[in-house]
Amino acid sequence: MKPRRWLSTSVAMMTFGILTFATLPTASAQLGSLFSALNPVETIDVKDLKAKLDRQKTLEDKAKEENQSVKSPFVLVDVRSDKEIDVSMIPGAITKAQFEKESQKYKDKTVIVYCLSGGRSSRYASQLRDEGFDVKNFKGSILGWCGAELPVVTPEGKATNRVHVFSDRYKIPSRYEAITD
């Protein structure tokens, strides 16, 4: 076989194999991260998220003064575990469980997801995108938020300086108390 024919035959066989393999349910699950890497979810950084949250807070305060309600164009979703969320969250966020309980309510909003460092939220963002949501992954997640020394709150909305980080592997500014248990 001539080198050129061998190359085109090999490419055709590999393409057919990948396409066939990727259509199998188990293959899709196993290769999902590969395909997600080829089509990553859009991200949002700390500066842009803070600006969105500040703008939303201003609109809510003004609407409250005028006895009106305001509809937010986005929802911030914390996809961390209950153990992490019980320590603190970014102000204005809801939990993944709250989001999933009424997900259709958020179909017309941009869904911004975060976790500890961005891995879990990236996977969840890909899943939501595949379900038809307009979604962004908060780049840096709560570690990035704390790195910018921004406030965190308890699930009840009270200010705190505690952040669940699993281990001393993750560094946060000294103004925060790292919780590892």
Image: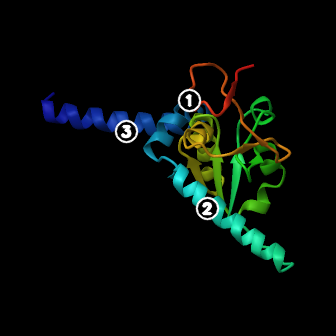
Q: How far across and how far down the image is residue 111, in percent? A: 66, 55
Q: How far across and how far down the image is residue 134, in percent? A: 61, 59
Question: From this viewpoint, is residue 113 visible?
Answer: yes
Q: Quadrant of residue 148?
A: top right
Which disc number belongs to residue 52? 2
Q: Residues within 10 Å of mark 3 (few under 14, many from 20)?
A: few
Front tag of 3 and 1: 1
Q: Is residue 133 above or below residue 22?
A: below
Where does label 1 land, which residue?
30
Where does label 3 land, which residue?
15
Q: Nearer the viewer, residue 132 or 91?
A: 91
Q: Is residue 171 above or below residue 106?
A: above
Q: How far across and how far down the image is residue 104, in percent? A: 78, 59
Q: Nearer the viewer, residue 161 or 35?
A: 161
Q: Are marks 3 and 1 in contact (CB under 8 Å)?
A: no
Identify residue type, mark 2. Lys
The mark nearer the N terminus, 3 or 1, is 3
The mark nearer the N terminus, 2 or 1, is 1
Q: Is residue 143 left or right of residue 17?
A: right
The mark nearer the N terminus, 2 or 3, is 3
Quote the CA–CA distance across marks 3 and 1. 17 Å
**Quarter holding the C terminus?**
top right
Q: Is residue 5 left or right of residue 127?
A: left
Q: How far across and how far down the image is residue 180, in percent? A: 70, 21
Identify residue type, mark 1. Gln
Q: Is residue 122 left or right of residue 177?
A: left
Residue sitting at 56 percent across and 29 percent down? 30
Quote the CA–CA distance across marks 2 and 3. 43 Å
